[in-house]
Amino acid sequence: MPAETLDRVFTWINEYLETREGETINLVWHGGEPLLLGASYFRAALEIQRRRCGLNSGRISHSVQTNLTLLNTDFISIFKEMGITTLGTSFEPLPGIRGMGTRMDSKAYNEMFFKGLKLLRENNFGWGFIYVVTRRALTQPLTLFHYLLNLALGKGFAFNPVLIYGEDTHQLRITPKEYMEFLGALFPAWWAHRAWWPSVEPFTHYESLIVQKRARVGCADSGRCHTSHVYIGPEGELSRCGRAADWDIVWYGTIEDRSLRDVLSEDAHNKAFAQRNQVLRDGECRGCRFWDMCHGGCPLDSFAAHGDLQHKSEWCDAKRLFIEKYFEPVTGARFEGFSATN
């Protein structure tokens, strides 16, 4: 993103904060690989933020999702100045899935990853990671699980299914049912030793919802993502979120012609998102006891499968299968929704 566009972004954010007392904004630096920008870019961005946002700068926080391979002390310094003390990353121990160049050199990649991880530890940075479940992971779930637990060493990590847009060149795609059976193979082990092991998602999330009855859900299951998330591209182009931009859907113009308040409102551009809850509750999700924790899943899954936002996610049935087949029998807890007070 050019400096001129970045300047406009912070002006745009400040305009929003001026009209929304008490609200805060988290900027997630994502990619591709954001560290390719260089440490000097982040330093310049922070200077622009301070100049354009003034006192409101204190209401802006930053997060970075990086593969750690380019991390150095210059980044550590500016990240601390930006208030960043934890980095998000991802890791793949299986060879040939992630690596350098067309040959997918996993060894070289992992050496750089662990060098970055060592630097984080030396500078007291927190970190958590995502493990993306592919077809190759399905044959050895417990082996992978224990490897990742040892890697985490008290830190948190999350399992996400691989999402492949277009042709599955490397034959990594999995079905929702396969993903949930993978989780089902791990869950009894995690539940039995959860006091020893770090936060593992989505297990910790389900425990919070079903056992502790805490009514907190992420963006994909909230039914309200259109009022909380927005993607800003390198030329100031706007979309619903990173997934929407990846799929080249749900565009909102640019920061030159729309305000942040406008993009996050329930206007005509967001009408389909705003109506989705009612459509699903009266239709495909009618009578589902998991409605409060799911709301039909990510709207973009509906768009990918049907070309609109008015259907439940293809992952919904598998999520119900995991809870009914594994979570509830193992824990003895049962989800019946949240009370009105929650």
Image: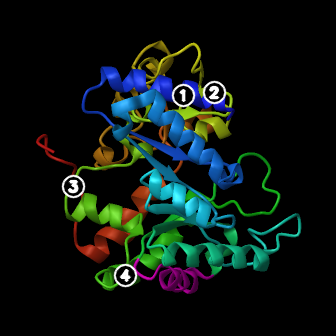
Tell me if residue 33 is in the magenta stretch.
no
Mark 2 and mark 4: span between their CA atoms? Answer: 43 Å
Residue lying farthest left?
A: 341
Q: Callout 2, which amino acid?
A: Thr
Q: Which circle's residue, 3 or 1, is located before the other in the chain?
A: 1
Residue lying farthest right?
A: 102
Residue for badge 1? 9
Q: Secondary structure at mark 1?
A: helix
Q: Which circle's residue, 3 or 4, is located before the other in the chain?
A: 4
Q: Secondary structure at mark 2?
A: helix
Left or right of 155 in this view: 166: right
Please tell me how crowded label 2 is: few (under 14), some (14-19), or many (20+) other residues with Cα within 10 Å.
some
Which-is-in-front pick, marks 1 and 4? 1
Which-is-in-front pick, marks 3 and 2? 2
Q: Which residue lies at the image location 42% right of the left edge and 74% below the top edge?
A: 155
Closest to the observer, 237 or 326: 237
Q: Callout 1, which amino acid?
A: Val
Where 219 falls versus 256 (above or below)? below
Q: Which circle's residue, 2 or 4, is located before the other in the chain?
A: 2
Mark 3 and mark 2: span between their CA atoms? Answer: 40 Å
Q: Position of residue 158 (x, y in %)?
A: 48, 66
Where 27 falls versus 151 (above or below)? above
Please tell me how crowded label 4 is: few (under 14), some (14-19), or many (20+) other residues with Cα within 10 Å.
some
The reply to whether discs 1 and 4 touch (Cβ–Cβ < 8 Å) is no
Residue for badge 2? 5
Residue for badge 4? 197
Q: In the rendered image, is residue 250 in sight?
A: no
Mark 1 and mark 4: span between their CA atoms? Answer: 40 Å
Closest to the observer, 179 or 17: 17
Q: Which circle's residue, 3 or 2, is located before the other in the chain?
A: 2
- Please report the bounds of the magenta region as a residue range: 140-154
